[in-house]
């Protein structure tokens, strides 16, 4: 797989600054959805870089530092659980991506944006949504690592405050142990109330009272 295919096609057309955009955290029951936009230099090399979900945590952390140190610019966008409940996770993911792009646009003039499948209808920069883009574009793969490590670190911080829920292990995803912990210890602030397992628990609590 040539991870530079989409970037090289744009470079050939005279485009210099390409932002790869990806988001992490659609599935978890708690916490923000996090997006990153990353612009890489033409000569960027990082052996083994691919979709962050396919990398070990150790490798992601190593890659994160290398990408941050060697990229031209990057930006992060986050949307809260409250807003996810209000506008839905799809729109929240889109909004997080737009925020990340805006953050990069403060630093450099983006000329094209590559996104992981998401069309960005309000974006006034030419952009290309790529299905499974995090495994097909080097810029999107880099953004996926930044977004994933950023969100995981937020879950580790939450884990320090609420160790009984084991956020450091499941990262907020609806595992059996996670749902058991919610039922046992209750819901803390930051849960997505429109997500079914959480909604079911809230409905149960309402019926009890």
Image: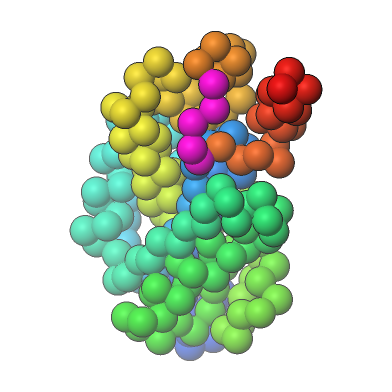
Magenta stretch encompasses residue 128 = no
Can you name the residue that lies furthest to the front here? 209
The reply to whether residue 16 is in sight is: no
Instruction: Please provide the residue range marked out in magenta.
Output: 186-190
Placement of 207 over or under 61, stated as above or below: above
Where is residue 171? Give x, y as percent: 47, 30
**Residue positioned 49% across, 31% down in the render:** 188
- Main SS of the magenta part reads loop
Q: Is residue 188 above or below residue 69?
A: above
**What's the image's color scheme?**
rainbow
| Quadrant housing the C terminus | top right
The residue sitting at 52% across, 53% down in the picture is 80
* Magenta-colored stretch includes residue 189: yes
**Is residue 97 at least partly visible in the picture?**
yes
Q: How far across and how far down the image is residue 163, in percent?
A: 35, 19
Q: Residue furthest right?
A: 207
Tell me the residue at 42%/19% (across/down).
166
- In the picture, measured across the screen, residue 92 lies left or right of residue 108, that is right
Instruction: Give the quarter of the image for residue 77.
Output: bottom left
């Amino acid at each position: 797989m040539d991870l530079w295919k989409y970037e090289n096609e744009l470079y050939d057309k005279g485009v210099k600054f390409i932002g790869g955009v990806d988001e992490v955290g659609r599935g978890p029951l708690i916490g923000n959805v996090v997006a990153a936009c990353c612009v890489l230099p033409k000569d960027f090399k990082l052996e083994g870089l691919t979709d962050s979900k396919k990398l070990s945590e150790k490798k992601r952390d190593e890659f994160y530092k290398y990408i941050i140190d060697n990229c031209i610019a990057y930006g992060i966008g986050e949307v809260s659980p409250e807003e996810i409940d209000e506008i839905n996770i799809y729109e929240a993911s889109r909004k997080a991506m737009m925020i990340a792009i805006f953050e990069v646009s403060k630093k450099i003039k983006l000329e094209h944006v590559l996104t992981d499948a998401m069309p960005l209808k309000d974006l006034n920069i030419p952009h290309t949504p790529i299905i499974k883009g995090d495994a097909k574009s080097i810029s999107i793969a880099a953004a996926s690592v930044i977004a994933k490590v950023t969100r995981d670190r937020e879950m580790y911080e939450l884990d320090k405050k609420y160790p009984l829920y084991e956020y450091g292990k499941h990262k907020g995803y609806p595992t059996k142990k996670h749902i058991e912990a919610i039922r046992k210890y209750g819901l803390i602030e930051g849960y997505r109330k429109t997500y079914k397992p959480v909604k079911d628990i809230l409905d149960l609590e309402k019926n009890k009272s």
